[in-house]
Image: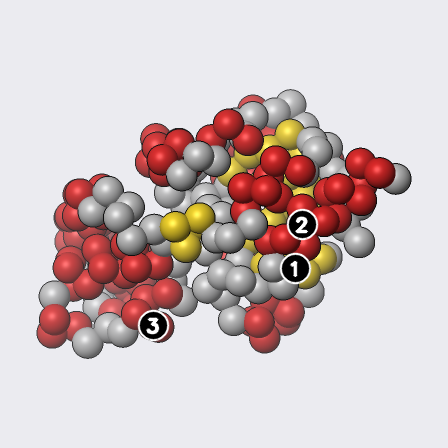
Amino acid sequence: MIPHFPVYLFDVDGTLLDSAADICGAIRSVLGPQSGATDQFLRSYIGRHLYDLFEDLFPGITRERMDAMIANYREIYLARNHSSTRAFPGVAEALAALPGKKSTATTKGTPTTRAVLEMFGLLPYFDHVQGTDDFPAKPEPDVIFASLRALNASPDDCLLIGDSPTDMKAGRRAGVKTCAVLWGYGRREDLLQCEPDFVLEQPSQLAVQARELFQA
């Protein structure tokens, strides 16, 4: 059973929201059909900065070219208006049941994160919304530290919940406890190799454990 934590930080894509269709669709529009990148391949980069993807696909690409591609991606992604995105079943119930303060720790920018959480009715459950704004993305721990500062909390207070090895590595670097969720885009074997402190198979498990905490 996961013990109570004063603070819970959530990754967004692949943890709260099933957003792969919109993310991968926007990336494919940027890359063009000649890239041959499959959804399965692109899903493995969700949660990482697009620089990682473009550098792997186009060795030697310049930063200026990548910045232009990222700007194009953001325009296309926002124009899709999250039409193929859904909250994972049980996420809202888990957030409602979970005690403690809650924030996000996502590679999305903060304004986009706030907008998408509001669109899917999840924003009221959060005390703070934190995206990656002009600082290094996960697996660097900066977004976690930004959330902790906003909540006036320490790493010892915090559980980070995410679906990718990038989340687990960022959590370790920040000195927080980590919880790997297996309903997202990360491969089970890769997540378990990161030795998370806790593992969940379904969002409903988080809600059940939260209710048990209240009853304890």
- Mark 2 Cα shell of 10 Å, populated few (<14), some (14-19), many (≥20): many
Left or right placement of residue 54 versus residue 216 in this view? left
- Mark 3 Cα shell of 10 Å, populated few (<14), some (14-19), many (≥20): few
Work out which residue is located at the far right of the displayed protein and give it.
Answer: 216
Q: Which of the two discs, 1 and 2, labels the residue nearer the N terminus?
A: 1
At mark 2, the secondary structure is: helix
Q: Position of residue 134 (x, y in %)?
A: 36, 35
Q: Residue at x 11, y 74 (%)?
A: 34
Q: Residue at x 19, y 63 (%)?
A: 28
Query: Any mark on residue 123, and which?
Result: none
- Which quadrant would residue 210 be assigned to in this image? top right
Which amino acid does the dot numbered 1 rest on?
Leu
Q: Position of residue 40 (x, y in %)?
A: 35, 72
Which amino acid does the dot numbered 2 rest on?
Leu
Q: Nearer the viewer, mark 3 or mark 2?
A: 2
At mark 1, the secondary structure is: strand
Q: State the separation of the CA atoms marked 1 and 3.
A: 24 Å
At mark 3, the secondary structure is: helix
Residue 196 visible (yes or no):
no
Q: Position of residue 200 (x, y in %)?
A: 65, 59
Quadrant position of the C terminus in the picture: top right
| Residue with the mark numbered 2 | 206
Residue 207 visible (yes or no):
yes
Left or right placement of residue 203 versus residue 99 in this view? left
| Residue with the mark numbered 1 | 200
Which amino acid does the dot numbered 3 rest on?
Phe
| Residue with the mark numbered 3 | 41
Quadrant position of the N terminus in the picture: bottom right
Q: State the separation of the CA atoms marked 1 and 2.
A: 7 Å
Left or right placement of residue 193 versus residue 212 in this view? left
